[in-house]
Image (cartoon, grey):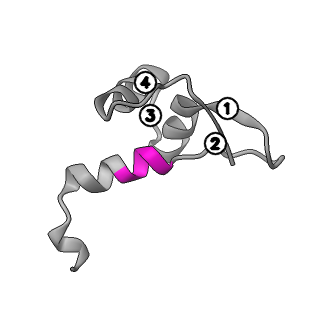
Amino acid sequence: MSVSEISDDTLLERAVRSARARSTRKGVKHPRWTAVMDAFSLGSTYSRELCRRFGLNPDEMVKR
């Protein structure tokens, strides 16, 4: 399978699910929406909305 066969929606969902907060200290947790904000250069409202679009809790704490 080539990447062109994967839908844009699927690629976006994979990126949102795997987003991790950027931190200089390993193990420090941040809300998922913050990681999505960093990954996509979005504001907090759009970042939270993008998490919810794929059934994820924007306030779930994720670590690097």
Q: Are marks 2 and 3 in contact (CB under 8 Å)?
A: no
Residue 27 is left or right of residue 51, and the answer is: right
Q: Which residue is mark 4?
A: 48
Q: CA distance from mark 2 to mark 4?
A: 14 Å
Q: Is residue 47 above or below residue 28?
A: above
Real-space Cα separation, disc 4 to disc 3, in angstroms: 10 Å
Disc 1 from disc 3: Cα separation: 16 Å
* Amino acid, disc 1: His
Residue 21 numbered mark, or none: 2
Which one is in front in this view, the residue at disc 2 or the one at disc 3?
A: 2
Identify the element where label 1 is drawn.
Answer: strand
Point out the stretch of residues depicted in magenta.
Answer: 14-18
Query: What quarter of the picture does the N terminus occupy?
Result: bottom left
Classed neighbour count for the residue bearing mark 2: other residues with Cα under 10 Å, few (<14), some (14–19), many (≥20): many
Nearer to me, 38 or 51: 51
Residue contact at pointers 4 and 3, CB within 8 angstroms: no
Amino acid beneath label 3: Leu
Question: Of label 2 and label 1, which has the lower sequence position?
Answer: 2
Q: Which numbered disc flags the more N-terminal residue, 4 or 3? A: 3
**Which residue is label 1 attached to?**
30
Q: Which residue is mark 3?
A: 42
How crowded is the residue under tag 3: few (<14 C-alpha within 10 Å), some, or many (20+)?
some
Q: Please name which of the two marks, 4 or 3, marks the residue nearer to the observer.
A: 4
**What secondary structure is found at the residue carrying circle 4?**
helix
Front residue (pair 39, 26) = 26
Distance from disc 2 to disc 1, alpha carbons, whole Å, reads 6 Å
Q: Residue at x 25, y 53 (%)?
A: 10
